[in-house]
Structure formats: C-alpha cells, structure tokens
Image: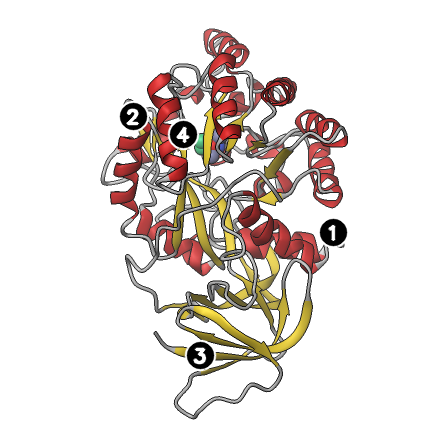
Amino acid sequence: MSTILIKNGQIVTATDDYVADILVQDGRVHTIGKEIEVGADIPVHDASGLLVLPGGVDVHTHLEFNFGDFETIDDFETGTRSAAFGGTTTLVDFCNQGDKTPMDALEGWHKRAEKACVDVSAHVILNKVDDEALAQMRGLIHDEGISSFKLFTAYPGIFMVDDAGLFKAMRQARDNNAMICVHAENGGVIEVLIQEALAAGHTGPKYHEATRPSIMEGEATQRVITISELAEAPVYIVHLSASEALDAVTRARDRGVPVFAETCPHYLFLDKQEYERPGFEAAKFVMTPPLRECSHQHDLWRGLKTDDLQVISTDHCPFCFHEQPNGILYSKQQGVDNFNKIPNGAPGVETRLPLVFDGGVHKHQMSINRFVQLTATAPAKLFGLFPRKGTIAVGSDADIVIFDPNQKWTIKAEQQHSKIDYTLFEGKEIMGKVRKVFLGGRLIVEEGTWHGKRGMGKFVKRGNAGKI
Ligand code: URP
Ligand code: ZN
Ligand code: ZN
C-alpha cells in the first residue's frame, strides 16, 4: 500500500486542534509531527489553511433497503459514493430482518454491501424477537461483529415489536455488550389517527405530520427508557425529533441512566411549514418522525450543547420524488392519493458534514471539536468502531477529510452523487466544503472528482457498543 503525506493542515479531533503533518502508511496514520520529510516519490497533499478532519461516521443509513412495498433508490455503490463526496467514510447501515432469520438477513446484506465504496457495518433490525432471534443475537455480536440492533415501537405490521420483545432483546444485548437502538413512536395510536384522517378524506402529504404527534414520540421514548432501566441495558434513541422525547432523554441522563440519542440535520434546519408546499411537493418531506414546529429545533440545538444528544446522523432513506423508469417501488408518487402510501424517508448522506458545520460552527457557536465529536467520534465510540474510526491518531485508519471552513457553495440536487432526484435543502447557501477525502490513505474524492472504486469499501467488524 502507498505512502502519502498530508502537510500543514489544521488537524481537528474531538479534543485537539493543531497544525501538523500526517504521514500515512499501509492505510493507517503512521506519524503525526512537524515538518515530516519524505522522498520525492511520495505524494504530498498540501492542506495549508484547511481543516484536516477524521472521516465522518454516519450510523443511520438505509441502502437498498426494503421497506414494506418499497425499496430505497440508492444501492451500496451510489449511496456510499454520495457519502464519500460529503466527507463520510464509514456507514453503519440497516439490515432488515424481514421474513428471514437475523443471520440469513445479514448474509443478504453482505452480498449487497460488496459494492460499497466506503467502509460499512450494519445494525440488524429485529422485527420478530423469538427464541431463535434472541439466540442468534449472540452469534451476530461475537462472531459477526454486529454489536447493535434496531427495534421499532412504530409501523405496526411491518417493523413494530411489543414491549416484551423489546425487553428481552435489551437484556440479551446487555449480557453481550451490545446496544439496542429504538425508533420510538407510539405505532398503535398513530395507526388510529391515520385511519381516521383517511376516513375523513384527508389524503394529502401534510396529514403524515398531523397523524404523528410529537407527544407520541415523547410517550414512546419515555416507555423505551423505562424498559431499558428495568433491563439495565444501554439504549440509543434514533432520529429524535421532538422536545418531549428530548425531555425524556434528559431526565434519564440526569439520573445517570445510559441513554443515548441522535438527531438528524432535517430536524435541526427544517420545520413543518414544508408540509404547506403546493401540490404534492410536500411529499419530499415525508419522513418519520415528521418535521416539527420550529420550537423543537431550538430544543434540539440546546440538546446538542448539553450533550443530551450525542450524535448527528442522516437517516438517509432515499425515495425519488418522480416516478422511476425501473418501477414505482422507488418513488413518492406511490402515495399521490393517500399519504399513508408515500414511502417514508429522505436523502441526506452527502450534505450532513457541510450542513452541520455551517449551522453549528458558523451559526450556533459550536466548537469545531464538538462538530467532530457529533459527526465522527461519538458515533464511532458508541458503536464499537473507535479508535480505528472517528479520530486522527497514530494507528487509526487513514480516513481523512480535507475541509475548507470558509468556502461558500449552494446545495443543488443535480450536483449530488446519489441516485435521488431531489434534496431537502435545494438552494440553501452554506459555508464549509469538502475538498479531499481519503479512505484508508487512498484519495477517493478530489475537488469534486471521483477517484474511488466500486467495492473498495471494507466491512468492519465492530466491538462492544453502548459506552462513550
Ligand atoms: O422516514 C424514515 N425515517 N424512514 C426510514 C425508516 C426509519 O424509520 O428509520
Ligand atoms: Zn426509524
Ligand atoms: Zn431510519
């Protein structure tokens, strides 16, 4: 493997910030120091005046993901390439159990993930917590390096499990140093509201939001936390969007309960006004949980400050707005007459780092160390990837981003590298841009040009989860 030198950059980790050179050898950081000398044959990347960051770690993506009658449009090649252009070099994607055993489901996920262009792992979604699934959790954790699982209290008939299943899975995770991630909304109550709305002739996309009230996210989050306390297991709340849910997390953390939570850029920058867009446009914003009143955004930014929220991930779950030549499976148009048939999910894997840098560091007094912690270090630690991923240190994988903190640019769907045909942030002007990305020391993105290869990403076996 080749040697490279990254020279004179401002190296930023969750704790440090200094100017130095990084010598990379055999895919790892070999030396960090001042004025490192190399031979004329060694490629040198001058990072003067630029930030040198650990590659982003996004622990919430859905690539080639089967969701009821739908499938996300990005496969592992396009989704991971898009991630790379946005400065993210490791994904923890969701492997859906469906009607298989968890082990068989993981085998299928591995086949699909062979195309990955950045490093990947998976959380296995358990929608059937029976004795076989509980037993297989042990093998998944200890033999396969899968130390986290996702369970749902929402989507009855597709993913939802009952409290008993949740409790059993949490205890099994606790006994094996793994962690349960939960999508926390009250699926039963929401289903009643959906059926009532449809019966009243309310079919437009805005009723997606109206039928998923924030207090039902708060209720489910509190219930999940209470069950985790009884199970004495760490728990991770995914895509937290609501003040009521954050309150539940904050109260528990104040008591010393090991509860962790992520939010996503769309909850930090957008609100429910988007559902007032004319025609079917609002369908672009149909994700779960839905966008909330503006006041929730303020609470989420506070939660990031107080460390009641530890991670920002994307929930990249792309369904095209327009119908696709390869089938309706991939398009929001499925729900043009019925909001309940709009596939839930939105894109975002390419814009996370620049959006959070612009909104956090430039506009919300977030330190650059905290930015790195939220987007790389904390997710790597919580999900058993640290210190191989999530930092720049001697011996870490040389997944490195050279980032210009002051470059202004405008987000446009047509410039994205995903297969998706829209972005939630069309026309948004931001400051902060990815210039170069290295994966294991190999230059894969350079000033908007792709040098990576399909299949170059590796599967990463993860260690213990649930500690930070
Ligand atoms: O709308 C969303 N979030 N779709 C993806 C599935 C999930 O709940 O994470
Ligand atoms: Zn979810
Ligand atoms: Zn998701």
| Marks 2 and 1 close (CB-CB < 8 Å) | no
Disc 4 residue type (three-letter)? Ile
Dot 3 lies on which element? strand
User: In terms of depth relative to the viewer, which is nearer, 323 or 149?
Assistant: 149
Residue 364's disc number: 1
Which of pointers 2 and 4 indicates the residue nearer the eye?
Answer: 2
User: In the figure, is residue 54 to the left or right of 361?
Assistant: left
Residue 4's disc number: 3
Which residue has dot 2 on it? 101
Disc 1 residue type (three-letter)? His
Which residue has dot 4 on it? 125
User: In terms of depth relative to the viewer, which is nearer, 458 or 85?
Assistant: 458
| Marks 2 and 4 close (CB-CB < 8 Å) | no
Residue at mark 2 to residue at mark 4: CA–CA distance? 11 Å
Q: Residue furthest left?
A: 326
The image position of residue 54, as x and y in percent, is: 55, 62
Residue at mark 3 to residue at mark 4: CA–CA distance? 39 Å
Q: In which quarter of the image is residue 227?
A: top right
Counting labels gives 4
Q: Which of marks 2 and 1 is nearer the N terminus?
A: 2
Q: Which residue is drawn at 39% across and 72% down?
A: 26
